[in-house]
Amino acid sequence: MAVTIKDVARLANVAPSTVSRVIANSPRISEETKRKVKKAMEELRYHPNLNARSLASQSTQTIGIVMPSSGDAVFQNPFFPSVLQGISEGAREKNYALHMTTGKLEKETLEAVIHMVQGKRVDGLILLNSKVEDKVISYLRKMDFPFVIIGKPSKHVEEITHVDNDNVRAMREATEYLIDHGHRDIAFIGGSLELMVTVDRLHGYKQALKNANIPIKNEYILHEEFRREGGQEAVSELMALAQRPTSLVVVDDFMALGVLSTLNELGIKVPEEISVVSFNNVLLAELSNPPLTSVDINIFGLGYQASKSLIQKIENNNEPTKRIIISHKLVERLSCSEPS
Amino acid sequence: MAVTIKDVARLANVAPSTVSRVIANSPRISEETKRKVKKAMEELRYHPNLNARSLASQSTQTIGIVMPSSGDAVFQNPFFPSVLQGISEGAREKNYALHMTTGKLEKETLEAVIHMVQGKRVDGLILLNSKVEDKVISYLRKMDFPFVIIGKPSKHVEEITHVDNDNVRAMREATEYLIDHGHRDIAFIGGSLELMVTVDRLHGYKQALKNANIPIKNEYILHEEFRREGGQEAVSELMALAQRPTSLVVVDDFMALGVLSTLNELGIKVPEEISVVSFNNVLLAELSNPPLTSVDINIFGLGYQASKSLIQKIENNNEPTKRIIISHKLVERLSCSEPS
DNA sequence: CTGAAAGCGCTAACAC
DNA sequence: GTGTTAGCGCTTTCAG
């Protein structure tokens, strides 16, 4: 068996509880015993058994993440590693570890969450709110278990701490950018309306058009999957229209890539014949041909703030509900024509 | 407090130990009591406390991953999500969870590992052998703790289970591919020689040249970082040479991207003036301009087999040491000129 | 086939 | 300041 707190206690000639207090750096322990105990710990190469600690103290110093299923498209999208990187950095700074499980179907996901929560494997949870994990959220709320959402919850927005961009504004600005560049026929290529991010961005798009007195055309509004194929399909549809748009706002760089390649196949030049603004500003945006003008939503920041605020919530149970908005920034590249 | 095994026992009118046996699906329990106990568990919505279980059973059903530090370039490289996806899938199939920590410096990494291992947070470890984590490996060996390496260990190759490609052969083939296409001036752009992957691939490169009676030129062998900038620098150097190479083998798609962009800036046409073969075949390879001929090393497979074999090792302590070779495949695209 | 009881290694009252 | 003593919730001998 490994060396335990008792061994240390024996060697240092104190009680186990004293050792425990030294580990916790309790203020009411004399400097001398502290030193003595620490020496004993060194000597025996003592390392606490975290399971025992977690069992006794009801805390784990780890935060849980429910990943998309491994087959999921999300894995392909560079969004995921970036947000994970942010989460991981926020956790590391506070000495929290990460615990991840995957759920294929919604049902599996819920089970995985229950497993983590009831199993007391984690102190809190970060949800990558790709789909509307309604079941998961209501479970966590019922259990009063700390969690934060990256993105915007579809219900109870005021009662759930979440980290998000101001997607309405971001998309309004992106659209206005095109309007300022002389465009009036602007199409919107978004994801499923089940995703709040789509709802918000669509909203921003409409706002911008309305403000500029441009009528909204339903045939200019498309919903596809967040994948290259999605972008490809969208373009095919749009280009079949009698009146083709002269510019596109696309809610994801990956989709925009599909857009670009399809336009290329059709012999339609970007930005000469059609302008494209996209979202996320992942590395791909810079590398594509032409490089994409894209709204940087600071994905790392989303993850980072999510762990930060989750940890606050864990450590202070009556931390108020928060809504953290991460600022965005339009990064101009070469996919939009100059104002005429 | 949550519902415990005792509550279930009470409701089912059995002893706690019986409940435990039912959970473990012990064969020597009558079907009837099993049913009875299960019913009670349902009724109370019982979920085991995993910390308690881990403490008592000395096992966690969790595998640990040591990630590169969050600032690390590795995070940028699509290698990471893919390998994680593979690991995750292998773990999920066996109902293992993932536990990750990050280490910035080598020292931090070692501490994180010790924390996980002595803290009994994980049953085994997967090392992404980016750097030669010598300290970590010797620690794990000393502790006789299950671990597998993705990549090739720099020492004790025969005694450490690892999952790798046959990098010598892969690079030999890639080089031969260029030779078959009429090239004789082939440069090698690789990473640090501290990485076994570089050593092996360089070896394969030299083999191919030797077999074809092409003299090896040291000025054609470059070592840079696995980033775009690395590729850029390499090209600058090579193009300053009196006798420029007519083709390049690059050990990473990301570097190859840098190569491509720099060549483009210099006005050197790919593949007309110079041919490029690269490695990893991440999505980027397909999207670049021109699309890269790249060796697909099945990154997902590396991760997947790593968790599979780790779990085998965990569950059977005298599982033999294994070396698992994942097959590769050259994917032809447009970055190489046709044989003349 | 099932129950009783002794831990797993740690924390947290409660004493003194 | 420090020791004593119960647990935390589960598994696992050992009995029967």
Image (tube, coloured by chain):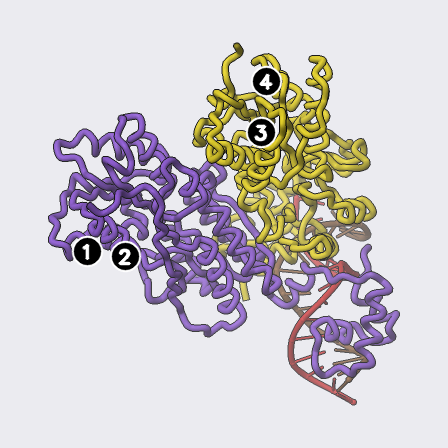
Chain colours: A purple, B yellow, C red, D brown
Q: Give the total number of marks visible in the rendering.
A: 4
Spatial separation of the CA atoms under disc 1 and disc 3: 46 Å
User: Considering only vertical position in the picture, is B214 above or below A185?
Assistant: above
What residue is drawn where x is 36% and y is 40%? A226
Q: Are marks 1 and 4 in contact (CB under 8 Å)?
A: no
Spatial separation of the CA atoms under disc 1 and disc 4: 55 Å
Q: Amino acid at mark 1?
A: Gln
Of the numbered discs in the image, which one, if any, rests on residue A207? 1
User: Considering only vertical position in the picture, is A219 above or below B113?
Assistant: above
Mark 3 belongs to chain: B
In primary-sequence order, the first of circles 3 and 4 is: 4
**Mark 1 or 4: the one toward you:** 4
Percent x, y of residue B93: 56, 37
Percent x, y of residue B98: 59, 47
Q: Amino acid at mark 2?
A: Val
Q: Are marks 3 and 4 in contact (CB under 8 Å)?
A: no
Helix, strand or loop under label 3: strand
Determine crowd level at label 2: few under 14, some 14-19, many 20+ residues with C-alpha closer than 10 A: many
**Mark 2 or 3: the one toward you:** 3
Q: Amino acid at mark 4?
A: Leu
Q: Are marks 2 and 3 on the same chain?
A: no
Percent x, y of residue B290: 44, 27
**Disc 3 designates what residue?**
B279
Q: Are marks 1 and 2 on the same chain?
A: yes
Q: In the image, is C16 to the left or to the right of B291?
A: right
Spatial separation of the CA atoms under disc 2 and disc 3: 41 Å
A30 or B177, which is in the foreground?
Answer: B177
Q: Are marks 2 and 3 in contact (CB under 8 Å)?
A: no
Q: Amino acid at mark 3?
A: Phe
Residue B310: name its quadrant.
Answer: top right
